[in-house]
Image: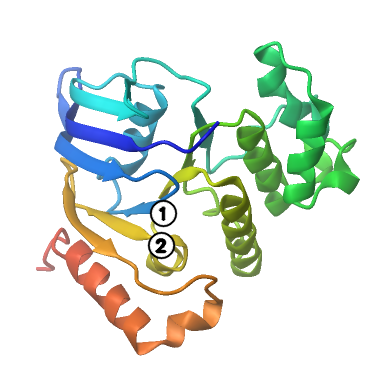
Amino acid sequence: MKSADIDVRNVTLRYGGKQPVLALDRLSLDVRPNEFAVIVGPSGCGKSSLLYLIAGLEDRTSGSIQVGGQEVTSPGADRGMVFQSYTLFPWLTVAQNVAYGPKRRGVDDPATVARYLHEVGLEAFADHYPAQLSGGMKQRVAIARALANDPAVLLMDEPFGALDSQTRHQMQRLLLRVWDHSKKTVLFVTHDIEEAILLADRVFVMSGRPGQIRRVLDVGFDRPRHEDLVLDPAFIALKREIMGLLRQDEVPAD
């Protein structure tokens, strides 16, 4: 499946109950086909909720969400989701986890499973179970499983947040390589500003709750990017700009 655009227009999300919460307020954003877009924002601003809405896992209160020109009303094979927790089936092998989505759609394609296991460097672990894998390896399986469905859009909710620094950098490089090969559209949520700049074509900075898009910043660094880029004065300046935008939501100390 080819990559697709994401078009979010005036989306509001309100949670009910005795004390209703306005999580997102008339939020709009657009992600281009094959773009690697990253969302950052303060804790509780609705970053993950926005991904769930685009994935069709939650219902918005109002507004429009389209992927590839089609209105999102439910989960679909055109969208793949990778969560921070690994969400693998512990009773299935690595290969069986990756094959799960296609088989649910009636597709038995060992070649596709083998292809994505190779992409994430886990072909030698095809017959292992999740309990036998490290955290980074489990997340590689989760990425391969999402890609095996051949989605147009890959939605990633802080997928490397639980990993140590070294493994996180390895996973960033892996993801960028797989993205370059697959030509998918990626919308990635992180709280790590350096990760956002290293990965993104554009960074969407959200405001505090109720979440809106405060600023969209182009990341002009050439690819491929190395971790040493964090020492570049232009990188530091962009990081400082994003930090300044996020600080606007900080509560002043007494």
Name which residue lies at 63% across and 42% down.
Answer: 143
Mark seen at residue 196: 2
Q: Nearer the viewer, residue 58 or 134?
A: 58
Name which residue lies at 25% across and 68% down.
Answer: 242
Cα distance in 3D space between marks 1 and 2: 7 Å
Place of residue 209 in the rendered image (x, y in percent of width and height, measured from the top left): 17, 43
Mark seen at residue 27: none
Residue 19 sits above or below residue 106 on the image: below
Place of residue 101 in the rendered image (x, y in percent of width and height, measured from the top left): 66, 22
Quarter occupied by residue 231: bottom left
Place of residue 169 in the rendered image (x, y in percent of width and height, measured from the top left): 60, 67
Quadrant of the rendering where the C terminus is positioned: bottom left
Quarter occupied by residue 222: bottom left
Name which residue lies at 19% across and 71% down.
Answer: 244
Q: Nearer the viewer, residue 150 or 130?
A: 150
Q: Left of 197 or right of it: where is 42?
A: left
Sequence-wise, which precedes: disc 1 or disc 2?
A: 1
Amino acid under disc 1: Thr
Name which residue lies at 18% across and 39% down.
Answer: 28
Q: Left of 112 or right of it: where is 155?
A: left
Q: CB atoms at circles 1 and 2 under 8 Å apart?
A: yes
Q: Which residue is mark 1?
A: 190
Label 2 CA crowd tier, 10 Å (few <14, some 14–19, many 20+)? many
Quadrant of the rendering where the N terminus is positioned: top right
Quarter occupied by residue 55: top left
Amino acid under disc 2: Ala
Of labels 1 and 2, the one closer to you: 2
Q: Secondary structure at mark 2?
A: helix
Residue 12 sits above or below residue 187 on the image: above
Q: How is the image coloured?
A: rainbow
